[in-house]
Structures are given as C-alpha cells and as structure tokens.
Amino acid sequence: MKKFGLGVLTLLVVVGFNGCSTRLGNMTVVSTNNVDGLSADVKTEQRVKGESCSHNFLIIPWGDFQNRLQIATDNAIDNGHKAGLKGDVLVNAKIGITAWNTIIYGQNCMTVEGDLIPLAKSMK
C-alpha cells in the first residue's frame, strides 16, 4: 500500500510540473521606437487585419502553435493585397490575443492590425 501511495504521489508531482514553449514568429522589421527615415505621418485610409488561431477539443490542442505572430502578420499583408493595397510593411500595428474556452471546445487567436505601406516610399 505504501508503494502505491508513493507511486500516486510521484505521478501527481510529474503531472503537476509541466509546461510548454511556443515561438510566436520571426519578423523582418519590428520596432517600438521611432525609425530613422520612416515618415512619422505614414497612415493609410484602410487598415489591414490578419489572425492565426489554435483550437482545443476536450483539452487536446490542435492547430499551428509555432510562428503565430508571423502567420497573423502575413495574413494581414495578404488581406491588404487582396483588397488592392500595395505594400510590404505594417506600421502603426496593434497586436492582440483573444481566447475563450468551454468544457468541450476552445479557441486562442492572435490578431495583427495595421497600416500597409511600401517601405521604399516611406523612407526619405
């Protein structure tokens, strides 16, 4: 009986100490500071938005967990191109995460929204 209790305690400790790591993305240009040569008044009429979502069903996760920030940014740029906008860089970007869960199903989405501009035209 003593061995069974020790085994259960060991199992609880192992299960209780777990974790995970997720790469959010690889970005070519990212800054929270002013960039020399980038026009400060760069703004477009239409903002673009993209997202990358992962799901879970009965606590079992599935979907793309790696490079979510990169995928959401790429989707925003692609959505801008589909809308007829020219550009390759997002400025004035907002990045957010929304998540919701029920007992059966849940979703976690990363969203990126910004002004799509061509980088060469914004440089002085």
Image (tube, grey):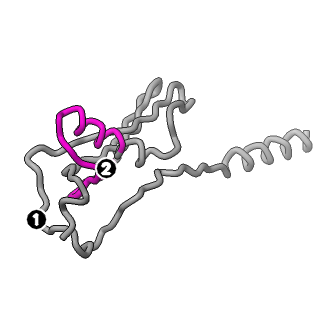
SS at mark 2 in the image: strand
The amino acid type, in three-letter code, at marker 1 is Asp
- In magenta stretch: residue 95: yes
How many marks are shown on the rendered structure?
Answer: 2
According to the picture, the residue beneath numbered tag 1 turns out to be 41
* Residue 114: assigned label: none
Mark positioned earlier in the residue sequence (2 or 1): 1
Quarter-wise, where is residue 124 in the image?
Answer: bottom left
Q: Nearer the viewer, residue 2 or 42?
A: 42
Query: In this picture, which residue range is highlighted in magenta?
Result: 74-96
Left or right? Give the position of 32 relative to 70: left
Q: Residues within 10 Å of mark 1 (few under 14, many from 20)?
A: few
Q: Name the residue rendered at 24%, 73% in the picture.
A: 34
Q: Name the residue rendered at 91%, 38% in the picture.
A: 1
The amino acid type, in three-letter code, at marker 2 is Gly
* Residue 96: assigned label: 2
Q: Residues within 10 Å of mark 2 (few under 14, many from 20)?
A: few
- In magenta stretch: residue 31: no
